[in-house]
Amino acid sequence: MSERRWPGVLAFVGLTAACAAVLAGVAALTEAPIEENRARRFEQTLTAVTGSARLAADVVWQDDLAPLCPDRALLRGTAAGYGGNIVWLAAARLGDAGPVLERVRITAHQETPGIADFLDRPESGWLARLPGLGSAELAALDTVSGATITTRALKRDLARALARPGLDDLACAP
Amino acid sequence: MSRTPASTAAPDAGTPAGVLTAGVAARNPAWIQLLGLCPLLAVSSSAVTALALALASAGVLVGSNVTISMLRRLIPDFARLPAFVLIVATFTTCAVLLMEAYAFELYLRIALFVQIIVTNCMILGRAEAFASRRPVWPSLLDALGTAAGFALALVSLGLVREAVGRGTVFADMDMLFGPGAAGWTMTLPGDWPGLLIATLPPGAFIIAGLLLGLGNAAVRARRRNAGP
């Protein structure tokens, strides 16, 4: 590198350090409200999935499963979607015929906006067809045209979670 | 560092008022230069999301223009584009963090499009064409004018799409201005049921095209009236 360029390189390095310092300051300033927002959002989702107001701290997870007394269970998982991980939370009803889905919510995803907007609208569209389905019925469920990878990944992951050994034997917390 | 002088054509070379108003009208980034159309079309499904993106874009534009103008003699010519992108990305990340902290519901709806402000050629264009060659005060005016022009385009499109698509105007403003703004919603008279396509991506193209055509027709009519 020519010696005449060194001042410019140093100026660029200094600019990079200044930008990093600004970002670190803003990140520190916003860390607490962001964590609070995320926790509140998760508890809203938890309440929507379980059907009753619930705090995240009240749920006792055992390997991505948690009992919901007396005859339900909470499941969580991560499916490999088209744009990245799709993080889901579901409630399942446990019965003699095997566990069936009760409600499913997507808590985070990076799927294509517009194409996969149905993931954010659990009350309508594809997600609304999931309640009442067991592991076998999920396999037969149609995927969404244009979002085949997304829906197939979710179907597989949900079916695998419902078929997990030990789901029926979840003990209720005292 | 050597810089070629900026174009002396009006209105950039004019008065402060000329610099400020050029971005709104004669050099409107969206309606005249057709820049930043991706977020413009994607986020303008309602007035509140359009206004939120306009505010975030304005913050990034003003911050980056002023910073680049202040540092214009320090930024090496051979690395000016990476330096501009670094500065714009810093302000964009700050906007994203602030939105996630203080306007979380809006963040959930438009976060992706706030993040891509960094690639908005309107911002990089003003940095390269104006802020890197001018002092801070004109650069600030240029940023304010350009931001106002972009906001005008975004909010006008958002208002029309919301009115046609849902039959409301200024709905959900509490997401941006707090609970006190929940009552700002106005409903169109006559029980307009809403035309769903207006809020969907095809509706964005159709309404943006119609507004652009109307604007062009108005400009032509004004020129005709002004005479030769």
Image (tube, coloured by chain):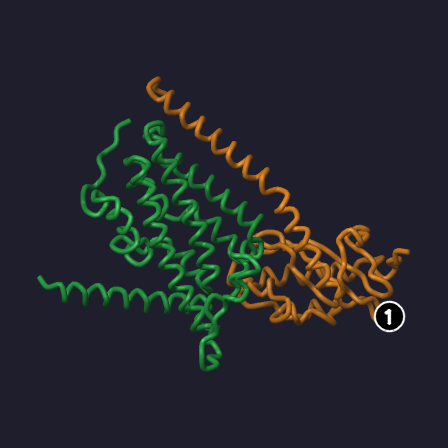
Quadrant into which the C terminus of chain A falls: bottom right
Relative vertical location of residue B66 with respect to residue B188 in this rendering, above or below: above
Where in the figure is residue A73, as x and y percent of width and height? 80, 61
Residue A155 pos. (x, y %): 67, 63
Residues A99 and A45: in front is: A45
Q: How many marks?
A: 1
Chain A tint as drawn: orange
For numbered disc 1, what is the local secondary structure? Answer: loop
Q: Which chain is green?
A: B
For residue A157, say whether it is visible: no
Left or right, B53 with reference to A70? left
In the rendering, at what x and y percent does residue A166 appear? 85, 57
Q: Quadrant of residue A137?
A: bottom right
Measuring 47% from the left and 39% from the top, which residue is drawn there?
A: B90
**The N terminus of chain A is located in which quarter?**
top left
Q: Which residue is mark 1?
A: A96
Q: Which image quadrant for residue B53?
A: bottom left
Q: Is residue A116 visible?
A: yes
Left/right placement of residue A138 relative to residue B58 reads right
Return the residue nearer the eye: B149 or B183.
Answer: B183
Instruction: Residue at 68% x, 51% y: name it.
Output: A39
Name the subunit of mark 1: A
User: In the displayed structure, does residue B93 sit left or right of residue B34?
Assistant: right
Residue type marked 1: Asp
Quarter occupied by residue B212: bottom left
Residue extending farthest to the bottom is B190
Give the residue displayed 47% in from the left and 66% down from the top. B170
From the viewer's side, name the closer residue of A169 and B47. Answer: B47
Instruction: Provide residue A156's location: percent of width, then percent of height.
Output: 69, 60
